[in-house]
């Protein structure tokens, strides 16, 4: 596992990956590690790159209440992993499903080049209301690189084990715990939690999730350790 020291170095490595038409890479890290910021910078540096955040696959809060899981929103079983894996598969040749005969020929041609040849639609996530936003992400066949970011891309159970095989490379974001916690607390406060509630959530549900994420870090193909 190689260690990368800058976003620019990471972008150069991704750009050099064998690309038969599309590559899909994963940026993984514990809550507050900075993976969203890194993923956004990578998309800006890589021509023709699209961003696919895992957060859009949060289950709606109403469903979490029904399941009795609202108080630990962000845990692995509070996401729709089936939908997430299906979207990743749809980016691949095996996920191509033509809607019409005319589209089928184009899809088949693109599939030969490692691209599904179809437009893939995925949900986004609104942090203000902590709800998924349907159809907020649209990835057309013209995008040769898709940068996926999320906590559980390397998890080995609960349905998440289907994710890593759909990624060409994975990058685990390593960061000092104190820095990560400070970022998390500040983010929770920014989105409406009191300082006490923000700290309690960061040290409670977020920290339990961080332990799971960090335990899966050995499965990454690369580590990103910024200064």
Image (cartoon, helix red, strand yellow):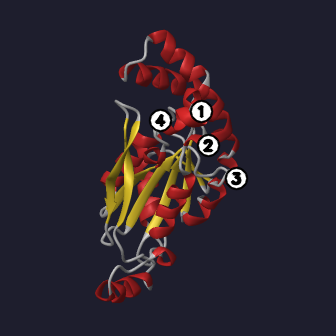
Foreground mark, 3 or 4? 4
Crowding at mark 4 (Cα within 10 Å: few <14, some 14-19, many 20+):
few
The residue most toward the front is: 66
Cα–Cα gap, marks 3 and 4 = 27 Å
Image position of 77 (left or right of 129): right
- The answer to whether residue 1 of the structure is visible from this angle is no
Crowding at mark 3 (Cα within 10 Å: few <14, some 14-19, many 20+):
some
Cα–Cα gap, marks 3 and 2 = 13 Å
Cα–Cα gap, marks 4 and 2 = 15 Å
Q: Are marks 3 and 2 in contact (CB under 8 Å)?
A: no
Crowding at mark 1 (Cα within 10 Å: few <14, some 14-19, many 20+):
some
Cα–Cα gap, marks 2 and 1 = 8 Å
Crowding at mark 2 (Cα within 10 Å: few <14, some 14-19, many 20+):
some
Q: Quadrant of residue 108?
A: bottom left
Q: Which residue is mark 1?
A: 69
Q: Are marks 3 and 4 in contact (CB under 8 Å)?
A: no
Q: Are marks 2 and 1 in contact (CB under 8 Å)?
A: yes
Q: Which residue is mark 4?
A: 62
Q: Is residue 44 above or below residue 16?
A: above
Residue 156 badge = 3
Measured from the top left, where is residue 118 in percent x and y?
A: 36, 74
Q: Which residue is mark 2?
A: 77
Question: Mark 4 falls on what kind of element?
Answer: helix
Foreground mark, 3 or 2? 2
Foreground mark, 4 or 2? 4
Q: Quadrant of residue 12?
A: bottom left
The residue at 59%/47% (across/down) is 152
Of the numbered discs 3 and 2, the one sitting upstream in the chain is 2
């Amino acid at each position: 596992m190689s260690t990368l020291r800058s976003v620019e170095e990471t972008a150069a490595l991704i750009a050099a990956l064998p690309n038969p038409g599309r590559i899909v890479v994963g940026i993984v890290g514990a809550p507050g590690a900075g993976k969203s910021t890194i993923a956004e910078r990578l998309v800006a540096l890589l021509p023709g790159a699209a961003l696919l955040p895992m957060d859009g696959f949060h289950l709606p809060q109403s469903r979490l209440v029904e399941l009795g899981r609202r108080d630990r929103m962000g845990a692995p079983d509070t996401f729709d992993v089936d939908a997430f894996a299906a979207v990743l598969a749809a980016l691949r040749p095996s996920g191509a499903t033509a809607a019409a005969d005319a589209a089928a020929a184009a899809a088949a041609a693109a599939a030969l080049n490692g691209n599904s040849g179809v437009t893939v639609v995925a949900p986004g996530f609104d942090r203000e209301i902590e709800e998924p936003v349907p159809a907020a992400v649209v990835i057309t066949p013209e995008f040769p690189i898709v940068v996926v970011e999320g906590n559980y891309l390397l998890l080995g159970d609960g349905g998440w084990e289907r994710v890593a095989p759909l990624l060409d490379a994975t990058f685990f974001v390593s960061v000092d715990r104190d820095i990560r916690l400070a970022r998390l607390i500040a983010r929770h406060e920014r989105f409406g939690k009191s300082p006490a509630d923000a700290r309690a959530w960061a040290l409670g549900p977020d920290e339990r999730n961080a332990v799971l994420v960090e335990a899966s870090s050995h499965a990454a193909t690369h580590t990103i350790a910024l200064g």
